[in-house]
Image (spheres, rainbow, N blue to C red):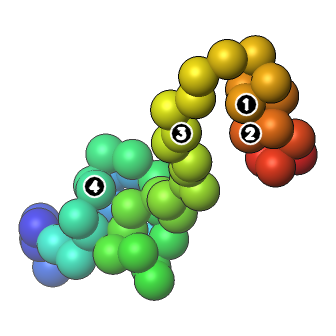
Amino acid sequence: MLKYGLTVDTDGDGVDDMNDACPTVPGIDSYSGCPRPLNTVAAEVSGEEAKEDVLTMME
């Protein structure tokens, strides 16, 4: 968005709102102005022993 010839950066992340896919959340240029994605793991386990194995792998 341009306003009087100036660029607008609502979230202050250095990526102009016009080029920012997440204009209200600070992010980085290489992710189009969005935050870096978190590394997540989803697991379905059965029993306490399996749960402990998953937690150990995530450490």
Residue receiving disc 1: 50
> SS class of the residue under badge 3?
loop
Residue 44, given in percent of the width and then of the height, sits at 50, 32
Q: Is residue 45 visible?
A: yes
Q: Residues within 10 Å of mark 1 (few under 14, many from 20)?
A: few
Q: Which label's residue is closer to the chain start, 3 or 2? A: 3
Q: Nearer the viewer, mark 1 or mark 3?
A: 1
Q: Amino acid at mark 1?
A: Ala
Q: CA distance from mark 1 to mark 3?
A: 10 Å
Residue receiving disc 3: 43
Q: Which label's residue is closer to the chain start, 4 or 1? A: 4
Q: Is residue 26 left or right of residue 24?
A: right
Using the image, tell me which numbered label, if any, was put on residue 54.
Answer: 2
Please report the residue visible at 59 percent of the width from the left and 56 percent of the height from the top. 39
Q: Nearer the viewer, mark 4 or mark 2?
A: 2
Quadrant where the N terminus lies? bottom left
Q: Amino acid at mark 2?
A: Val
Q: Amino acid at mark 3?
A: Ala
Q: Is residue 34 left or right of residue 42?
A: left
Q: CA distance from mark 1 to mark 2?
A: 6 Å
| C-beta proximity under 8 Å, tags 1 and 2 | yes
Q: Which label's residue is closer to the chain start, 4 or 2? A: 4
Q: Residues within 10 Å of mark 3 (few under 14, many from 20)?
A: few
Q: Is residue 3 left or right of residue 8?
A: left
Please report the residue visible at 41 percent of the width from the left and 75 percent of the height from the top. 31
